Amino acid sequence: MKKISKNMIWLLAIVSSIGTLFSYPKLPEQIPVHWNLRFEVDGWGKKGSIIGLGLLPLLILICFELFAKFSTRKISNEKHIKVYRILEIATVILMIGLNWTSIIIALGYNINISVILPVVMGIFFILIGNYMPALKGNHFIGIRNPWTLNDEYVWRKTHKAGGYLFIIIGVFMIVMGFLKSDYINKIVFIIMLSGIVAINVYSYYIYRKRY
């Protein structure tokens, strides 16, 4: 089952990349590459940039595989392997979704991106937050700072708190998608920025308290 799911995500990434190459000739010279807090397109780039976006899921998969194979902190615990693979699949699917969102908008199709993007991002954050506490110390994914990387206890406590933070952000993002409120958008942005600072301060506090 694990091998099937692993092969399926590789196949999905390959098909997406090939599809991107086939869509390239049909794209206009400018494609959307950035969205603002209202999830409105506010940045455009040359259509050649879609090639990089289309190949990104494959690159992410290669990076995940290389880390799992050559990391000095081997991924051996079965539960950790499961979490690692779930985060790998979720990240790749998200990147594929964002790539095809750019293509669909560039081709002139009218989709309600202001609802779809925050809801999808919200689900992604909730998924990560749910599995983050089970993630073991590593140098590739997670909240990596000098204090979490030097102590497994600090890593565990920080990622438990970080998991709650990601879930809260995810819930607010989903609400943001349906309410379409500038007030909610700003709250999510503030929570994200303050959360990044707070979680690193928290890990430093635990480390200093422990040593």
Image (cartoon, helix red, strand yellow):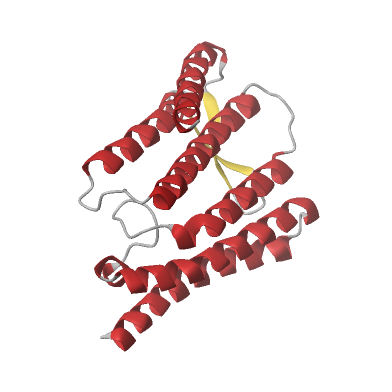
Q: Is residue 28 left or right of residue 118?
A: left
Percent coordinates x, y for residue 28 in the rendering: 56, 20
Quarter placement of the C terminus = bottom left
Q: Is residue 63 left or right of residue 95?
A: left
Residue 49, above or below 180:
above
Q: Nearer the viewer, residue 136 or 76?
A: 76
The residue shown at (40%, 68%) is: 156
Residue 117, above or below 127:
above
Q: Nearer the viewer, residue 42 or 145?
A: 145
Callout count: 0
Q: Is residue 8 left or right of residue 74?
A: right
Percent coordinates x, y for residue 87 in the rendering: 47, 46
The residue shown at (45%, 59%) is: 134
Residue 102 in sight in this render: yes
Based on the displayed image, in which of its 4 quarters is residue 107 positioned? top right
Percent coordinates x, y for residue 33 in the rendering: 52, 37
The residue shown at (64%, 44%) is: 120
Percent coordinates x, y for residue 122 in the rendering: 63, 52
The residue shown at (58%, 63%) is: 189
